[in-house]
Amino acid sequence: MLPQEIIRRKRDGETLADDEIEFLITGLTLGDVTASQAAAFAMARSRSGSCTPASRASTMPIVRLSPG
């Protein structure tokens, strides 16, 4: 997967799969996704909206990677 392709799809109003969202969040946490890409995703998400399943999918990788 490519971060820029996922960002483009979200920007264009497409619904992302859970694994795509997890890829971006995990990549950001591990340093594989840049801060600029995260900002672009946040902007695309705020413009096109987000549903509850997508919100849940974006928090699960953070929970799994959190210590303790």
Image: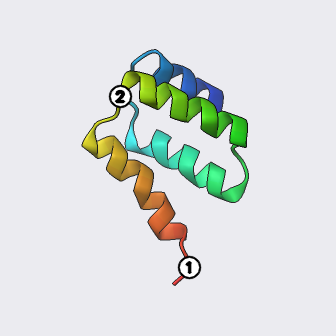
Is 15 positioned to the left or the right of 61 in the image? left
Q: Position of residue 3 (x, y in %)?
A: 63, 34
Q: Residue at x 50, y 62 (%)?
A: 62
Q: Residue at x 49, y 49 (%)?
A: 22
Is 58 positioned to the left or the right of 50 in the image? right
Graded by Cα atoms within 10 Å as few (under 14), some (14 to 19) or many (20 or more), the crowding at tag 2 reads: some
In which quadrant is the N terminus drawn?
top right
Q: Position of residue 64 (x, y in %)?
A: 48, 68
Q: Which residue is mark 2?
A: 49
In the rendered view, would you say 29 is above or below 23?
below
Q: Position of residue 66 (x, y in %)?
A: 53, 72
Q: Residue at x 54, y 68 (%)?
A: 65
Judging depth in this view, the residue of 37 and 4 nearest the camera is 37
Q: Which mark is residue 13?
A: none
Is 47 positioned to the left or the right of 8 in the image? left
Could you tell me if residue 6 is visible in this image? no
In the rendered view, would you say 32 is above or below 40?
below
Q: How is the image coloured?
A: rainbow
Could you tell me if residue 10 is visible in this image? yes
Q: Amino acid at mark 1?
A: Pro
Q: Earlier in the sequence, mark 2 or mark 1?
A: 2
Q: Which residue is mark 1?
A: 67
